[in-house]
Amino acid sequence: MRVLILGGDGYLGWPTAMYLSRRGHDVAVVDNYFRRRACIELNREPLVPVPNLHQRAALWEARSGFRVGVHIGDVCDYPFLRQIFREFQPEGVIHYAEQPAAPYSMMGHRQAIFTLTNNLVSTANVIYAVKETDINCHIVKLGTMGVYGTPNIDIEEGYLEVEHKGRKHTFLYPKTPGSLYHLTKAQDGDLLYFYCRMWGIRVTDLNQGPVYGIVTEESQQDERLYSIFNYDDIFGTVLNRFLVQAVAGVPLTVYGKGGQVRGYLNIKDTMACVELALLHPAAAGQYRVFNQFVETFSVNDLAARVQEAGRDLGLNVTIQNIPNPRLEAEEHYYNPAHTGLLALGLEPHYLNPAVLQAMLQLVQKYRGQIDEQLILPQVQW
């Protein structure tokens, strides 16, 4: 099918573009280089330098024979986005084009307003572009498990049936996000749900847990095709940060007590989940939610696993609990459902010692490019 990827230069966007094009889809990507510009502005460059999006697409085509169309522009610019929709006529659109970092959203007023504006306006623009060009175009939006918070009951997939005073009703599952970024993810979900009911659009919201990984099948042939891999305190996810810290000989920074439990998945599973959602679209008027993760771990669990894998490679990996820069529960109940994508055929990749050692060995190749000044958290809330 024709698939438009918004945020196609990002950590998930570019690997998804290669993955889908290799599987026979006609793929085009849109990006405004926010992630790259923010990394430069904040002096938080990724571990591995990567070419710009035009260069990556040309390299991918030369290596694989598969083409990815490239459009540089802002999804918040509605005339620009609408024109892309009219020209490309996507059957599915993947919305990765949101500011992706909780710490960035909590840095200050400017970052907060950008996060609110970018994430909500971009989502509204996608909705209107679908309505004006093809109401049947399926929106696949990347959400986050963080919208749920850590309630003291089981987390369902998007909805909760409530019995109250002898009557029952099904509501969207209550959301208690822990950062402004997560709040915008909750708000854009409500926005999409509203327009599903008003206009009959088709939406799948993938509430994804933290992702780990560097190399995919498509990028393993050339390091210039790697994704943007951040290990810093703003854009780096926890396991990716731990991998770099282990190689650098910096103690793994466990925030607070380390009992924070989340659902994690390999970057390869992200791409598989997105394609499964595209191949099995939501019905007209349906706001469908999948909880997109494979396994749950506490931060302490992850640190211990990285420490063990590092020791097997001869690394002296230590763990240090530091004051938690985030306002969050450090010990809590956490039992989220995640059956929807498995039912569609997801074949998960699990976090085992071999996977951890392979990632550590890859990071070791770039040991000289690690900036240890980027590791300790500098944003608090």
Image (cartoon, grey):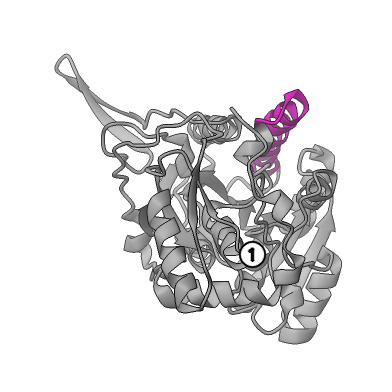
**What is the chief secondary structure element of the magenta stretch?**
helix
Camera sees residue 58: yes
Q: Which residues are magenta?
A: 106-132
Camera sees residue 124: no
User: Residue beneath label 1, please?
Assistant: 248
Looking at the image, which is closer to me, 117 or 288?
117
Q: Is residue 129 magenta?
A: yes
Q: Secondary structure at mark 1?
A: helix
Q: Position of residue 82 (x, y in %)?
A: 78, 45
Q: Residues within 10 Å of mark 1 (few under 14, many from 20)?
A: many
Residue at left 36%, top 68%? 345
Quadrant (top left/top right/bottom left/bottom right) for the C terminus: top right
In the picture provided, is 184 more to the left or to the right than 45?
left
Q: Is residue 309 magenta?
A: no
Residue at left 83%, top 48%? 37
Residue at left 41%, top 35%? 148
In the rendered view, tell whether residue 319 sits above or below residue 184: below
Q: Position of residue 337 (x, y in %)?
A: 30, 48
Q: Position of residue 48 (x, y in %)?
A: 74, 67
In the picture provided, is 185 more to the left or to the right than 342?
right
Looking at the image, which is closer to me, 132 or 346?
346
Q: How many marks?
A: 1
Residue 64, by quadrant, is: bottom right
In the picture provided, is 205 more to the left or to the right than 122?
left
Instruction: In the displayed orientation, state which residue is furthest to the top.
Output: 165
Q: Position of residue 234 (x, y in %)?
A: 67, 44
In the rendered view, tell whether residue 334 sits above or below residue 116: below
Quadrant (top left/top right/bottom left/bottom right) for the N terminus: bottom right
What amino acid is found at the position of numbered circle 1 in the picture?
Answer: Ala
